[in-house]
Image (cartoon, grey):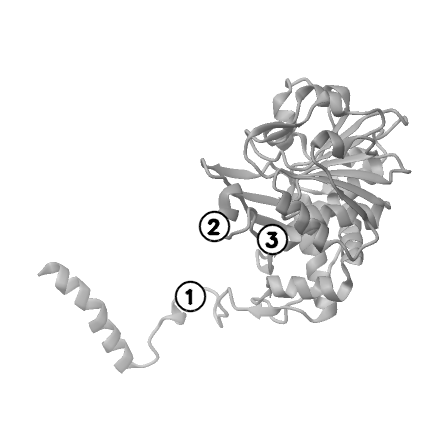
Amino acid sequence: MKHPTLIQTPTQTQFLSVEDVAALVSQVGIAATLQRLADYILEDYRRWQDFDKCARVASHSSDGVIELMPIADAITYAFKYVNGHPKNTRLGLPTVMAFGVLADVATGIPVLLSELTLSTALRTAAMSAVAARALARPDSKRMALIGNGAQAEFQALAFHYLLGIEEIRLFDTDALATRKLMRNLQHTGLRLSACTSIAQAVRGADIVTTVTADKTNATILTPDLIEPGMHINGVGGDCPGKTELHPEVLRAASVFVQYEPQTRIEGDLQQMPADFAVTELWQVLRDQAPGRTSEAQITLFDSVGFALEDYSALRYLRDAAAALGLGQALSLLPELANPKDLFSLVRPASHEQAAASARADAEPALAWAA
């Protein structure tokens, strides 16, 4: 499948800044952006077997994690650089920051370099909606949203615009975060209510989304809070040593994951034995495995984020930016008359310059010898 390109010359890379992506969302509209991202994600998950996949490469520290997330099909290679540092907000920095690249498999040329901090929040929300369309009860109207930080508004809007959620009950240990969310979404048709406990928020909910940030083995949801027919969208448990759900919640549910080898290391699934049964979501999206099979069934999407969603997001950003004329060309690669003559970029243009360059090169060596 061929895709449009933004670059004008073979060695130029199109760059999308945070401002470019924000302008794209503004022009397209956030509802349409979420819908189109969901469409791209669904299209790519349905061709799951086309991709060369691996779990992301992570470097952990006591303060957080830095990760690389690569994936490729026969035409396009993609990767995302992303961090997760919960303490960053104390420094005035985002918990999650990211950028990504699309490259041409045939030549290795990076076609697109884009911010992915804003885009990750959008694609994660779109992914939640794709999963919930397959797993939640179709008549779902009420959601509990536990964790009201940087990604919460995007989750709320994806469920509102793409699934028809009408009411969201909110809880966060930081009351300011909840007020921030309510202020940001007051223009929507959502009914928003702040709750004083997790139990109050989840009572009677059709869907429960957990999106907390702390890198700890937490138990945000316990078995006594789970009701028949709930769909649980577990977003915050996304690295080793970071969970949100009590193990018995998983045992009570039908569990669906993006890429099982990665989720067993990073998701709430890390708490379970190796033979605990899960279903990769692509199988449901291709009608190769059942999703929800009854009204009373409890379904759980153990979402950790997978490189395929970033591939989809970068693909959408490239196409939408081209249509809107956003971004700028970067010279990341040398343009050479003779591709074997890389030295020509630094070769002096004249004998006088060559002699001056030779003298400059000799001075450090002479000083060392002395």
Q: Nearer the viewer, residue 193 or 220?
A: 193
| CA neighbours of label 3 inside 10 A, class few (<14), some (14 to 19), many (20+) | many
The amino acid sitting under disc 1 is: Leu
Residue 251 found in image quarter: top right
Q: Quadrant of the C terminus?
A: bottom left
Q: Which residue is rendered at x = 62% and y = 47% of the image? A: 176
Asked if residue 104 shows in the view, the reply is: no
Give the x, y percent position of residue 145: 73, 39
Distance of label 3 from label 1 (alpha carbons): 34 Å
Q: Are marks 1 and 2 in contact (CB under 8 Å)?
A: no
For the residues marked 1 and 2, what is the alpha-carbon distance in whole angstroms? Answer: 42 Å
The residue identified by callout 3 is 117
**Label 1 vs label 2, nearer the camera:** 2
Q: Amino acid at mark 2?
A: Leu
Identify the secondary structure beneath mark 3.
Answer: helix
- Mark 2 crowd level (few <14, some 14–19, many ≥20, 10 Å Cα): few
Nearest to the observer: residue 214 or residue 74? 214
Q: Give the quadrant of residue 290.
A: top right
User: Of tags 3 and 2, which is closer to the observer?
Assistant: 2
The residue that mark 2 highlights is 91
Choose the circle earlier in sequence order: 3 or 1. 3
Q: Is residue 235 visible?
A: yes
| Residue 89 in the image, given as x and y percentages of width and height | 52, 48
Marks 3 and 2, how far apart in space?
17 Å
Image quadrant in which you'd find residue 118: bottom right
Instruction: Give the quarter of the figure containing the N terminus.
Output: bottom right
Give the image location of residue 54, x and y in percent: 61, 37
Is disc 2 placed on a helix, strand or loop? helix
Mark with earlier residue (3, 2): 2
- Badge 1 marks a residue whose secondary structure is helix
Q: Amino acid at mark 3?
A: Thr
Would you name the residue on which mark 1 appears? 342
